[in-house]
Image (cartoon, helix red, strand yellow):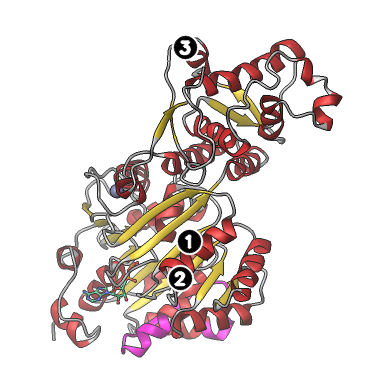
Amino acid sequence: MTTTPNEVLRRIFGYDTFRGEQQEIIDHVVSGGDALVLMPTGGGKSLCYQIPALVRQGTGVVISPLIALMQDQVDALTALGVRAGFLNSTQEHAERDAVEKSYLSGDLDLLYLAPERLRSEQTLRLLARGRIALFAIDEAHCVAQWGHDFRPDYLQLSTLHERWPEVPRIALTATATPATHTEITKRLGLEGARHFVASFDRPNIHYALEPKNDPKRQLLRLLTGEHEGDAGIVYCLSRASVEKVAAFLQDHGITALPYHAGLDARTRAAHQARFLREDGLVMVATIAFGMGIDKPDVRFVAHLDLPKSVEGYYQETGRAGRDGLPATAWLAYGLQDVIQQRRLIDTSEGDDAHRRRLSAHLDAMFALCESVECRRVRLLDYFGQESTPCGNCDTCQTPPATWDGTIAAQKLMSTVLRLKRERGQSFGAGHLIDILLGRQTDKVQQFDHASLTVFGIGTELSEAQWRAVIRQLLARDLLAVTGDYGVVALTPESTAVLRGEHQVMLRHDPTTKTSKVPKKAK
Ligand code: ADP
Ligand code: ZN
């Protein structure tokens, strides 16, 4: 008895129609073709390999790094009547034996494998003794060293094709920068595969990225002003800030729960279950939360810290509005975020090339924050997709006012230059601003910086405005911040500004717009 993809879609999954390119992808794999699928989170990638696995003879072998989710995935499939199992390191011996046995007797439609399983010759021999319908390589960007989620085990996956050249392979990812796309193709040998690239636009998501001044209050304004009673996720970088922000929101009458790797497994599972089940719950979490979470009515995703990459940002914000209804992706960023993350990168393990990649990821994310263009245009451009201004982001709706920051930039750069040339010293942003504002701080006295000719030459701007200037110069590579102490330094590009050959137009921070604005700075 042969079944068709359409029958499986209706009878097993209970859906009437395929979405986007699902049908073409499925038909292609069912007929034995290789495929590379680039589709945003929530686009419906799973069916693209699950249905071919059910239609073709044998077991669909799914390689997935999301070990923590395997049990859930298998349970969900089992509930639909699909025969599924998994093999990973968290399993008891007896359980593993049972799964292996049902694979060998042809009683499994889908077998989920952790990538490190394939390093063992034993697993490969096991696979060889059964019948394989297809290989699905989920989260395929993990093979790309350029990606943000590289796993060395994924490099092994090229051997699958050498061993089973006749078994079709389908690689899937929600990360689709041109660089990652190229690397996946090369490393998995998918040059001959059909590439299916879905649009990465999420038109129902409203993007808003604003400078931080009082982040918890800014968040509260978003939650009470625009999203009262809505379910949403608030991402923070550290466990400590997750706890603090969750407590802050609770104090203000919002049902908020914390989620991070420092909580015990039972608490985490309970919080996640409540988030999925209850209406209007706000989850305050580290990025440990969200992988594989399928809640359609998340109305907002808020970032209180700068994500490490545009890929990460896109994936996290992509959890908002999966039901297609309006949703908000809101982010607050500050100079301190950049300095802190730069420091983490500089002191991170790994080689220089690795650090350069991390820096490039951070720079791209930061540039998105400081962009005066449509956010969506910039975001899609990052994923290699051209578009026109969207009308549904902060910069489209309130085009940022700009001002000529050339003189401010020159004052700041001269301060950095003088300290270096005349004193052989370098300092972080805070002290530079103290000098520009002519503040008699302890440090100024200790180093006798009041005697510098640049001391007090920047009083036309407030401290917040100077921070905004530094941030924007950093985002455009006109300044650099390096080392353990967040020391600010000039870049090769700074010279043209200092010489007056390069005009620097800066955006007004929305939050400082009403405060002192430099008149025609002379
Ligand atoms: P991805 O892996 O791309 O993030 P999923 O495969 O988890 O996305 O699918 C996201 C959601 O969309 C799931 O709830 C899934 O059941 C649903 N879905 C997928 N395909 C269809 C379809 N053809 N019709 C209706 N719902 C679908
Ligand atoms: Zn826009």
Over which residues does the magenta segment extend? 74-95
Tell me which label, 3 or 1, sits earlier in the chain: 1
| Residue toward you, 181 or 510 | 510
Disc 3/disc 2 C-alpha distance (Å) = 47 Å
What amino acid is at disc 1? Ala
Q: Is residue 229 above or below residue 184?
A: below
Mark pair 3, 1: CA separation: 39 Å
- Name the side, left or right, on which 415 lies relative to 111: right
Judging by the rendered image, the residue that carries numbered circle 2 is 232
Percent position of residue 453, x then y: 70, 13
Q: Amino acid at mark 3?
A: Gly
Question: Do the numbered discs 3 and 2 sit on residues whose CB atoms are within 8 Å?
Answer: no
Mark closest to the chain's N terminus, 1 or 2: 2
Tag nearer the camera, 3 or 2: 3
Residue in view at x 45 percent, y 81 percent:
276
| Residue hosting label 3 | 500
The one of 68 and 103 positioned closer to us in this rendering = 68
* Residue at mark 1: 302
Q: Position of residue 361 (x, y in %)?
A: 48, 42
Tell me if residue 410 can be seen: yes
Residue at disc 2, secondary structure: strand
Inspect the image, locate mark 2, and give the three-letter code of the amino acid beneath it. Gly
Residue 91 magenta = yes
From the viewer's perspective, is 214 left or right of 51? Answer: right
